Image: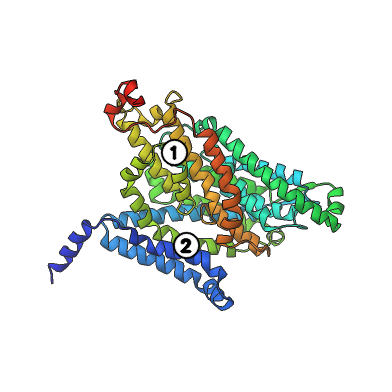
Amino acid sequence: MNDLLPQIFSAAAETPVRLWMAIPFALLLMLIAVAPLTPHRTKELWEKYYPHVAVGLGLAVAAFYSLWMPNGVVAVWHSFKEYVSFIALVGSLYVISGGITIKLNGEATPKTNVVFLLMGALLANLIGTTGASMVLIRPWMRMNKFRLSPYHIVFFIFIVSNVGGALTPIGDPPLYIGYLRGVDFFWVFEHANLPWSFVVAALLGVFYLIDVRSFRKAGARGHVAEQSAEGMTLSVSGMKNIGYLMVVVCAVFLPGQVSASVREVLETYFIREIVMIAAAAASYFQTHPKIHEENNFSFEPIREVGFLFIGIFLTMVPALAYLTSHGPEIGAALTHPAHYYFASGSLSGFLDNTPTYANFFDLIRSLAENDPEGASASNVVTWMTNSENHQYNLLVVAISLGSVFFGALTYIGNGPNFMVKSIAESEKVKMPTFFGYMLRYSLPILIPVLCLCALIFLAAPDAGTPPADPTAVEAPAGAAAE
């Protein structure tokens, strides 16, 4: 009996990651998608017990993985730390933004809405997609209150909560990972501003056509024409909370500005997260209750996100491990920047886009390390992001755009998506279901735009993947043609 436990753990050390281990993750996603569509009684049960289900599945996977898999404890702890960082950021921004009231009196016209969404896309690069979403979603709903429809919220998720933040490391967490790994702060802006402009403009164009139709219908009822004639007036309350918002944004990027030893202390003791939570607590208790009342502020949306995402973060550990362990096979199948774009994007739509980006970035770096010139460079990341290395540039651009843009594919593709949905539903907006969101908006509107983006910007004649085999680099030009 005394020899049994060592034998068990010896076997565990040789246990490979299997795809079936991701079943709890798939089950949780299925419940999130299907439960709201079930009969009334079943739906009520889900709404009452979803915290127990999400946390239960997460703990079950964490226990199995920690006890049975090699380095399982490390993997689970790493995922839990990412969850703490995620919920601290999303929660603090939610609380602080709840203390800022932006009043736009008068009904917005389609042109006003387009300008607002464009400003939101730009702001996302300064305070992040989460910050921009939390600050702007309530005024967005107020300015369209006479004809507020689900498509208003969906396009807000498309543009402000996702696509808009693709220009700077502040904009979206995947780009921040690239920044921490050596990509210059302004590199993505320099290399991705044209694809960003195209996708934002295309989505705004589609939104404008839909909104014009809605505006005309509402105007025919007499509501909008009367309100719009008065013009739009702007007033802001809770300005001191802008300072707390800046504290959170600075806390996000603090580890990237200090030495590795100091960064380790900050991350080990959750200093960054403590600063965020302290800023949120100070904001909440110093904000006048009237402002919270005007914003219909409650903790229910962040509570829902908190419970569901702890389950998602823990159950997706095997899924991410499977992706990592099969990196070489995945890399062999990717022969063009567009492949990296769609592969990183499709996974980001259902998995956390930050580790997805990290895995593909490491894959590209391994290609560069196998390149004779890259292997001889003092800094591989600096070398592969040099403008002269056009092929590697395109690969990094591809995963940067894919990880950010495709976050809008589902409600769980990016943290702000579910939060915006919850806030809208708390204001009695009848949002589409998980599948409804995809079938009515993502697939017919977002995906064609993103495909056109790949066709235009990632289909250059010399955009092939750099060869991993050093001998292939030295092959004669004629051999490649043959």
Q: Which kind of residue does numbered mark 1 sit on?
A: Gly
Residue 50 left/right relative to 478: right
Pinpoint residue 124: horizontal percent, then vertical percent: 59, 43
Disc 2 vs disc 1: which is toward the camera? 2
Residue 282 left/right relative to 7: right
Pinpoint residue 43: horizontal percent, then vertical percent: 55, 73
**Rendered residue at 48%/44% (across/down):** 403
In the structure shown, which secondary structural element does the residue marked by tag 2 occupy?
helix
**Rendered residue at 64%/46% (across/down):** 242
Q: Residues within 10 Å of mark 1 (few under 14, many from 20)?
A: many
Which quadrant, please, contains the C terminus? Answer: top left
Cα distance between the residues tagged 2 and 1: 28 Å
Identify residue for label 2.
29
Which quadrant, please, contains the N terminus? Answer: bottom left
Identify residue for label 1.
178
Residue 51 left/right relative to 151: left
Of 89 and 221, nearer the camera is 221
Of 476 and 315, nearer the camera is 476
Q: Which mark is residue 452?
A: none
**Rendered residue at 30%/58% (across/down):** 18
Of 105 and 406, nearer the camera is 406
Q: Earlier in the sequence, mark 2 or mark 1?
A: 2
Can residue 393 be seen from the camera position used here? yes
Pinpoint residue 152: horizontal percent, then vertical percent: 68, 53
Q: Which kind of residue does numbered mark 2 sit on?
A: Leu
For this orientation, the residue located farthest to the front is: 482
Q: Residues within 10 Å of mark 2 (few under 14, many from 20)?
A: some
Q: Marks 2 and 1: CB-CB under 8 Å?
A: no
